[in-house]
Structure formats: C-alpha cells, structure tokens
C-alpha cells in the first residue's frame, strides 16, 4: 500500500491509583484521557520523515530500520523504535501534534508510540499485542526497562472507563467512571527529578523484597511485617497495601459508590510518602490543600513521584482552577485508533 493518507490518534493517561506496583507485577488503575497525540501523513516510499509541533528536529530514517538507537533527535528514537518492532516496510511522511505535555507524567511517550504504530500500519484489532510492541519500542528508545501500564492503557482505553491492569499477567478489564465523578490533574510546579537514581533504587528495593517474600501482591501482611530490614519491609508493605487499594477502588467504582474513594486515595498518598518514600514536601502540601476544598473526595501524587502531578477525584462542581501550578479536568477517553 503506498500513497495512502493516514491519521492516527492515541490518548495520554492518568493513574487514578496504583503507583510503584507495576514493576513487581502488581495492580494499577489508570484511565485514558482526552489529551492526545495525533500523527497525520502519507504512507509512501522507503523512509519515515516526521516533524513534531512540540519538539525540534525531524525524525528521518530508512525502513526497514536497522539501528533505532542511533537515530536523532532523542524523540525520533521512539518513532524509530516503533518502526523497528512492528517491522515497518512502507515509509511515512507527515507530522506529530499533541495536547499531552511531554514529560508531564501523562504518558506522552506511550501516546506517541501508539499513534506512530497505527500510522505505520500496525494492526488495530489486538490492543494487548500492540501495547507489548510499543513497550518494547520504549525500552529500545530509552534503554530503560518499563512496565506495560502506559502502553496498554493508551491502546485499550474505553470512553467513560478506567482500566484495571494486572501487570503480572498483562490482563485487564474496564471499570466504569461514574458521570458525577470528576478527575483532575494538578501540576505541582516541581519538575520530576528524572535522575534515574531514586526511581531505580525503589525498584531494586521492591525487587529485593520480592526475592525474599515472593509475589508481593499475594504475600500476607503478617509475613511482610516480620521482615527484619525496615526499608525492604516498608517497600513490600506499600506494594501489598496499594494493590488492595486498587482492587477496592475498582470495586467502589463498579458499584458507583463514591463514599470510599477519598479514604483510599488519602491512604495511597500516605503509603507513597511513608512506605515507598517517593513524595516531596511540595506534593504533600498540595494534596493537603486540595483535600481541604469543598467537593474534593481525595487526592494523591500520581506517577513516579519526586515531583510531577497530583490526581484529584471530586464530586461535580469542585473548584480547583487556582491550585498548584495549574489544574485541568480530564475525561475518561477511548484508546488509540486510526480515522
Ligand atoms: P511522559 O511519558 O510522562 O510524558 P517521558 O519522559 O516518558 O514522559 O516521555 C517524554 C518524551 O516523549 C519526550 O521527551 C519526547 O522524546 C517524546 N515525546 C512526547 N510527546 C512528543 C511530541 N509531541 N513530539 C515529539 N516527541 C514527543
Ligand atoms: Mg512516558
């Protein structure tokens, strides 16, 4: 197929609950949002040439791509990584445009990967397979292992729903987000310190705890409490209790019952602060500020932590426009698609 006009769109996502659980095969509850990345162009010839409305430079390389890691600029590696994993043989000349802020914790990278994959002709009918490939493209592009959550949420999102994902089996199911529940993302104004170190360290510690105790989401709390090493005990306790909270929030949303939502979000933030140790004083103050506002059910840091954003669940009509460094309401949206 040549000279075919294509347009593919993929959403960003926000994690409602379930952070620092994915890399040890835990549960997560992200939601695809109404901010998205669009790739538009013409499928033709033997090379890819994409410019971005957000970032400088052009992603330009031949297909089939031989070494995606040598492509420049940096963002073009995601594009080349995707072309490599889907085995693209027909080129694409076009543009990338996005309302997902790059590096803002709303998974602009997965949105880019999914939109590029579909624009390059990857089959749309199997979101799990598509997500696996895009995850592998991200690992190629960044050189860092990542979980399946972002790509699976972007691929398999369903309008009006969040997605409960079991990261150990890579299985998922939809969870309805009640009409009267508002989801807000508040920028803390504190850039995520993306030095790999604290994140990689947390990951290593959780993995070390799992090596001693087994699959952390299933380990009884009593066994975790007996672990002599205080640090590993707290990391394990975070995973175990956070997975319980993910299940409980999913069940509450299934029932359309908002009463329990606030307590679960607050407990999640406390666990991320005290047991996972990934919060900051700025995030803690922002959560406290937001939680004191009328209509707010609960708030927690979302994503990797060490700065970044807070997710807020509120009843209709909560006033949050003036909090943090900027707040926006996001809506549960559909996954990646061509049109
Ligand atoms: P997040 O996924 O949380 O937004 P990441 O650091 O994982 O943050 O991914 C951000 C990277 O993804 C950017 O640095 C860039 O390389 C790439 N990217 C995201 N959006 C775009 C875009 N619109 N145009 C070009 N590259 C993008
Ligand atoms: Mg990302």
Image (cartoon, rainbow, N blue to C red):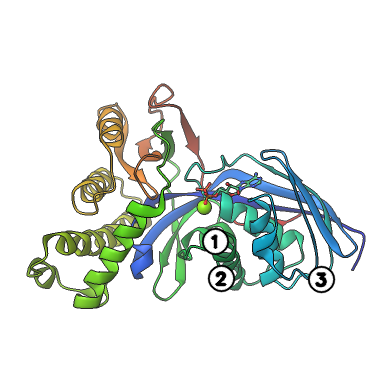
Q: Nearer the viewer, residue 264 or 36?
A: 36
Mark 3 to mark 2 CA distance (whole Å): 20 Å
Front position in the image: 14 or 247: 14
| C-beta proximity under 8 Å, tags 2 and 1 | yes
Q: Which residue is mark 2?
A: 132
Question: Which residue bears the numbered disc 1?
Answer: 151
Left-right relation of 229 to 329: left
Q: Which mark is residue 219?
A: none
Label at residue 89? 3
Mark 3: secondary structure: loop
Which of the two discs, 3 and 1, labels the residue nearer the N terminus? 3
Q: From this viewpoint, which residue is outermost toward the top?
A: 322
Residue drawn 45% across the image and 43% down it: 179
Query: Which percent across, then down, holds residue 301?
Result: 33, 43
How far across and down, in percent of the image, does residue 222 sit? 9, 70
Number of other residues with Cα within 10 Å of mark 3, as a class: few under 14, some 14 to 19, many 20 or more: some
- Coordinates of residue 33 in the picture (x, y in percent): 53, 46
Mark closest to the chain's N terminus, 2 or 1? 2
Q: Is residue 316 left or right of residue 11?
A: left
Residue at x 48%, y 66% (from the top left corner): 148
Say whether residue 261 is visible: yes
Q: How dense is the environment of label 1, judged by Cα within 10 Å: few (below 14), some, or many (20 and up)?
A: many
Residue occupying image coordinates x 64% and y 57%: 78
């Amino acid at each position: 197929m040549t000279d075919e006009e294509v347009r593919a769109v993929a959403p960003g996502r926000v994690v409602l609950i379930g952070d620092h659980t994915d890399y040890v095969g835990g549960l997560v509850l992200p939601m695809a949002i109404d901010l998205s990345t669009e790739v538009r162009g013409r499928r033709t010839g033997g090379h890819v040439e994409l410019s971005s409305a957000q970032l400088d430079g052009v992603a330009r390389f031949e297909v089939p791509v031989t070494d995606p890691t040598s492509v420049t600029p940096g963002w073009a590696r995601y594009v080349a990584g995707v072309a490599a994993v889907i085995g693209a043989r027909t080129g694409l000349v076009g543009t990338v445009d996005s309302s997902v802020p790059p590096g803002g914790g709303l998974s602009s990278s997965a949105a880019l990967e999914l939109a590029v994959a579909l624009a390059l002709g990857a089959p749309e009918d199997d979101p799990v397979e598509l997500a696996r490939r895009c995850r592998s493209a991200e690992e190629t592009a960044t050189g860092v292992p990542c979980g399946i959550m972002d790509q699976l949420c972007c691929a398999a999102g369903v309008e009006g729903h969040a997605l409960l994902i079991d990261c150990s089996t890579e299985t998922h199911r939809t969870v309805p987000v009640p009409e009267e529940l508002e989801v807000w993302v508040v920028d803390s104004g504190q850039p995520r310190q993306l030095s790999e170190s604290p994140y990689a360290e947390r990951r290593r510690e959780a993995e070390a705890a799992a090596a001693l105790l087994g699959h952390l989401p299933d380990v009884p709390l009593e066994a975790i409490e007996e672990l002599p090493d205080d640090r590993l005990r707290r990391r394990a306790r975070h995973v175990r209790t956070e997975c319980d909270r993910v299940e409980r929030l999913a069940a509450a949303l299934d029932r359309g019952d908002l009463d329990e939502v606030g307590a679960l979000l607050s407990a999640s933030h406390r666990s991320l602060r005290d047991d996972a140790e990934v919060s900051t004083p700025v995030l803690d103050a922002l959560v406290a500020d937001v939680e004191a506002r009328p209509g707010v059910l609960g708030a927690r840091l979302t994503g990797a932590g060490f700065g970044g954003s807070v997710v807020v669940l509120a009843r209709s009509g909560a006033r949050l426009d003036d909090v943090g460094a900027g707040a926006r309401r996001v809506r549960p949206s559909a996954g990646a698609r061509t049109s």
